[in-house]
Image (cartoon, grey):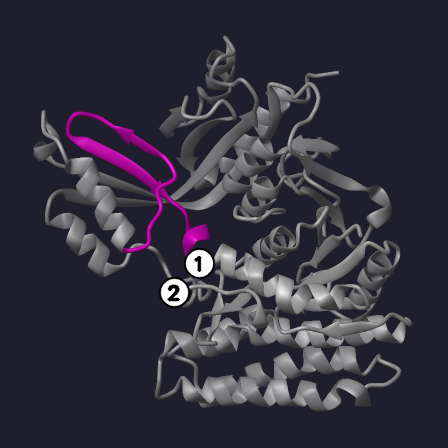
Amino acid sequence: MSLVVAKFGGTSVADFGAMSRCADIVLANSATRLVVVSASSGVTNLLVELTQATVTDETRLQLLKRIAQIQYAIIDKLARPQDVAAPLDGLLSRIASLSESLILNRSKAIMDELLSMGEQCSSLLFAAVLRERGASSVSFDVRQVLRTDSHFGRAEPQIEDIAALSRDFLKPLLATQIVVTQGFIGADAEGRTTTLGRGGSDYSAALLAEALCADAVEIWTDVAGIYTTDPRLAPNARPIAEISFNEAAEMATFGAKVLHPATILPAVRQQIQVFVGSSREPEKGGTWIRHQVDNPPIYRAVAVRRDQTLLNLHSLQMLHARGFLAETFATLARHKISVDLITTSEVNVSLTLDKTGSDSTGAGLLSEALLQELSQHCRVRVEDGLALVAIIGNRIATTAGICSRVFTVLEKHNVRMICQGASPHNLCVLVAESEAAQVVKALHENLFEGQA
């Protein structure tokens, strides 16, 4: 039996009308048996506010009221709201209870359970919308199958456990029902709720697709596929009909907001094709991401990732010595930090870090403890207010003339870092965030808009 996993983001399940459009998409394809949903738009941000230590009793009540209003606005449009009213009220009561628990206990485990509640509400309601359309549908608690470690806020999936549990508890349901479940959340071996970090709903869908050996993953969002760049920065940006896994991975990693960076990994492992489309305008089609595509171009897209941090490390110990980089990366690994780009000289190392690695609450990566540990063996300087602009394509490292063409565009801008050569699929430059929009627009005009 063909199996498609469909994931709908927060704007796609924002209200009853949006959920109804998503129901049309699900019911139009009999192969769509598993649906993964995010929290309704705005709910996760409200839940994050509830986790803050500074929240007052008055603000807490206001936040709880706003969360409830979003859910009740959906349930009030159902023909039989009484069918899900009691379980929804139970979830809202649990939100209030967890938020009060955080007053005395700032446990990350409690925060993760609180942050998971938006997805639990939207999956309950979306399954009800499908049933009212005549479908046999059930809301399934993904924590039964999506096993993770206990790193609350940014949990790591346990791939083999997810596969075994999905075969035992999830796959049997798919033969007779459309199963609606939650993105972004999982559970550790003790059954405690965990989260995969902000943007983890795409990742959840791909992990479940991998576990079930699905034929495709559909990521439904508010844009009609992947474009050559953000149309808000370059009005002449074009949609891309088909793209390879490698290109998509680079685009996701370097800032294409339509796709979470981790999503592509499970799909690559199982060579599961991924579709990205708009739930508002499904008739416009979208972008297919496949293992290979015919005649991939040298230039595929320009991506930008804002809010970058440049970490500069200076030490004379590096001069004709061994082990400095190993010690630096070991320190970063202990603090769960991954490095994006790196350049070195005899006595300096510069690293870029990105907040896509931050936890579910949005906490920063560079803790005081990390900076103190690094300072023990080098001088540390942190620069913020930067943006990473990446030219994505194919054969970039081996095609003559690319650098001269790019640097001609960049000659009026102060480039803080350049990285090229590690991958044939990208060339990256670090610039001031205030100049990022101009750089993207200029590169797009030069590389894409002159083409026929």
Instruction: Say which element carries label 1.
Output: loop
Image location of residue 272, percent across then percent down: 66, 43
The crowding category of the residue bearing disc 2, from other C-alpha atoms within 10 Å (few below 14, some 14 to 19, many at least 20), is: some
Which three-letter amino acid code belongs to the residue tagged 1?
Glu
Residue displayed at 35% across by 40% down: 352
Question: Residue 150's image quarter?
Answer: bottom left
In the rendered image, which residue does mark 2 sit on? 151
Q: Is residue 194 left or right of residue 44?
A: left
Is 365 left, or right, of 302 in this rendering?
left
Towards the viewer: 280 or 62: 280
Q: Residue at x 36, y 58 (%)?
A: 364
Instruction: Give the x, y percent position of residue 193.
Output: 49, 74
Magenta region: 335-358
Number of marks in the rendered image: 2
Q: Where residue 283 sits: x, y (%)?
A: 87, 46
Residue in the image at 15% along x and 30% along y:
347
**Disc 1: which residue:** 156
Give the x, y percent position of residue 293. 69, 26
Using the image, determine if residue 229 lies above or below residue 93: above
Horizontal side, residue 150 vs residue 91: left or right: left
Residue 140 image-quadrant placement: bottom right
Residue farthest toward the right in the current orientation of the protein = 134
Q: Which residue is at the front of the view, 242 or 140?
A: 140
Tell me, yes or no, if residue 39 can be seen here: no
Q: Three-letter amino acid code at disc 2?
A: His
Whether residue 161 appears in this view of the structure is: yes
Q: Residue at x 49, y 66 (%)?
A: 195
Query: In the picture provided, is 142 more to the left or to the right than 171?
Result: left
Relative to 379, is 201 above or below? below
Image-quadrant location for residue 153: bottom left
For the residues bearing labels 1 and 2, Cβ distance under 8 angstroms: yes
